[in-house]
Image (cartoon, helix red, strand yellow):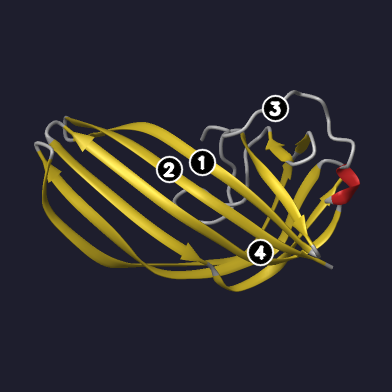
Amino acid sequence: MLASCKKEDTPATNSATIEGSYKFKYLSASTKSTVVSGDEKAVTNSDYTTSDNQGTVTFSNSVFTGTGVAYSLNTTAKSYLYFGGELIDSLSYPFSFTLPASNYVAQYQLIGADSIYFPQGSVTGGIDGMGPRQTNPSGGRYSITGNLLTITQHLSKDSTLNNSGETAHLKEDALTSLVLEKQ
């Protein structure tokens, strides 16, 4: 994962504005996965907002703690298959996942008045939507509207796959928004 925003490294002076306990409202994501191998390319897109959301998230002394965080997602992914740069097929298929109640802890730093950085990695969900887990260092923006805290992250990951001697390049991108309600 790569952090999408970087401001000057001046610690925020308003860290008390996000400190506290929050109810996990939902996670939304728009994802794109591209696999390229030789003349073949597959592009898969999905958009979702979680449901059956449970758990709490606490921000305290630069520690982000999730307790009993659980959700479900049920959407449709759309894939486009290309050969030699020409679209040869497309298909849609269901994409579902249920995250059982999970606990996690991560460090965070506020940068400026609207940015957040997770030096050991974000636990707000991987770009594949498969639940909270440590990732590479990442950052994003946060905003507070009334009693809602929203953390938005642009995430990107590049990797190389090797399957039976075939090498493929995988690029995954996501725009995620974690929405929390102050308790």
Mark toward the viewer: 3 or 2: 3
SS of the residue under disc 2: strand
Q: Which residue is denoted by mark 4 in the rendering?
A: 69
Q: Which residue is denoted by mark 3 in the rendering?
A: 7
Question: Looking at the picture, how far across and down is residue 72, in whole percent?
Answer: 51, 70
Mark 3 / mark 1, whichever is N-terminal: 3
Dot 3, how many residues are within 10 Å of its Cα: few (below 14), some (14-19), or many (20+)? Answer: few
Mark toward the viewer: 4 or 1: 1
Q: Does residue 153 appear left or right of residue 118 in this picture?
A: left
Question: Looking at the picture, how far across and down is residue 58, in whole percent?
Answer: 80, 56
What is the number of callouts on the image? 4
Q: Compute the Cα span from label 3 to label 1.
A: 17 Å
Mark toward the viewer: 3 or 1: 3
Residue 129 appears in the rendering: no
Q: Amino acid at mark 1?
A: Leu
Q: Which residue is denoted by mark 1 in the rendering?
A: 155
Within the image, what quadrant is residue 118 found in?
top right
Picture layout, residue 33 above or below residue 22: above
Q: Which mark identifies residue 115? A: none
Residue 53 appears in the rendering: yes
Picture layout, residue 13 above or below residue 71: above
SS of the residue under disc 4: strand
Dot 4, how many residues are within 10 Å of its Cα: few (below 14), some (14-19), or many (20+)? Answer: many
